[in-house]
Image (cartoon, rainbow, N blue to C red):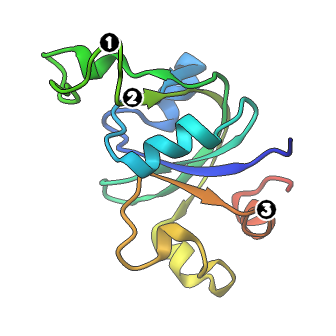
């Protein structure tokens, strides 16, 4: 199976590329959108590339690279009543929400949302589409080929 690329959004005050660099590996908790959950549960493979995107911050954009390093498993925050991600309808014998672990690969110069929007060759990225608010979106092989040089990495 070929490696896929995913853009995964995280609020840097919750989990930043620097946090990932320090820890080396983080569980991607808190996804509460069924389509994003389905990507993680059904399509992610260990070794898939992740574009680590900082969102809901002063300067959103791609801040680094990571790699999927686990198979999907239940997100424990759904069962924790003290968590903002608690889901009272989720049961341990039938969890609704899954996660994967991601491993740090590299911090890149920030490729800001403004810069992404200004690049005509990237106009087809899902993150740039009007109304797209998903926290996880696929990136095609062709899009990765166009993104890699802008991130200062080899495709």
Marks 1,3: beta carbons within 8 A: no
Q: At numbered mark 2, what does the secondary structure look like: helix, strand or loop?
A: loop
The kind of secondary structure element at disc 3 is: helix
On screen, residue 103 above or below 150: above
Q: Are marks 2 and 3 in contact (CB under 8 Å)?
A: no
On-image quarter of the C terminus = bottom right
SS assignment at label 1: loop
Direction bottom: furthest residue: 120
Q: Could you tell me which residue is drawn at 69 percent across and 83 percent down?
A: 121
Measure how far apart labels 1 and 2 are at the Cα level. 16 Å
The mark tally for this picture is 3
The spot of residue 64 in percent (x, y) is 61, 45
Residue 113: x and y, percent?
A: 47, 68
- Residue at which label 2 appears: 29
Please rate how many residues cluster around mark 1, counting C-alpha atoms within 10 Å: few if below 14, some from 14 to 19, many from 20: few
Point 40% across, 32% down: residue: 15
In the rendered view, tell whether residue 82 sits above or below residue 128: above
Query: Of callouts 2 and 3, which one flags the residue occurring earlier in the amino acid sequence?
Result: 2
Looking at the picture, does residue 23 appear above or below residue 44? above
The image's mark for residue 11 is: none
Residue picked out by circle 1: 92
- Mark number for residue 141? 3
Q: Is residue 86 depicted above or below 130 in this figure?
A: above
Q: Earlier in the sequence, mark 1 or mark 3?
A: 1
Please name whichever residue, 38 or 32, is drawn nearer the observer in this view of the structure: 38
Q: Nearer the viewer, residue 38 or 107?
A: 38
Q: Label 2 to label 3, Cα distance in Å?
A: 26 Å
**Quarter of the image where the N terminus is located:** top right
Residue 78: % across, % down: 27, 23
- Alpha carbons under labels 1 and 3: distance apart: 36 Å
Residue at figure coordinates x 75%, y 62% from the top left: 144
């Amino acid at each position: 199976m070929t490696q896929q690329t995913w853009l995964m959004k995280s609020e840097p005050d919750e989990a930043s590329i620097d946090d990932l660099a320090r820890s080396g590996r983080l569980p991607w908790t808190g996804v509460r959108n069924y389509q994003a959950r389905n990507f993680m549960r059904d399509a992610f493979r260990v070794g898939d590339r992740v574009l680590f995107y900082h969102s809901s911050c002063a300067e959103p954009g791609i801040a680094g690279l990571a790699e999927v390093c686990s198979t999907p498993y239940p997100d424990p925050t759904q069962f924790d009543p003290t968590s903002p991600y608690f889901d009272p309808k989720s049961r341990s014998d039938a969890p609704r929400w899954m996660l994967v672990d991601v491993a740090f690969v590299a911090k890149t110069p920030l490729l800001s949302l403004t810069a992404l929007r200004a690049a005509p060759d990237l106009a087809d990225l899902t993150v740039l589409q009007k109304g797209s608010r998903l926290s996880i979106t696929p990136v095609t092989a062709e899009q990765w080929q166009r993104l890699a040089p802008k991130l200062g990495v080899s495709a």
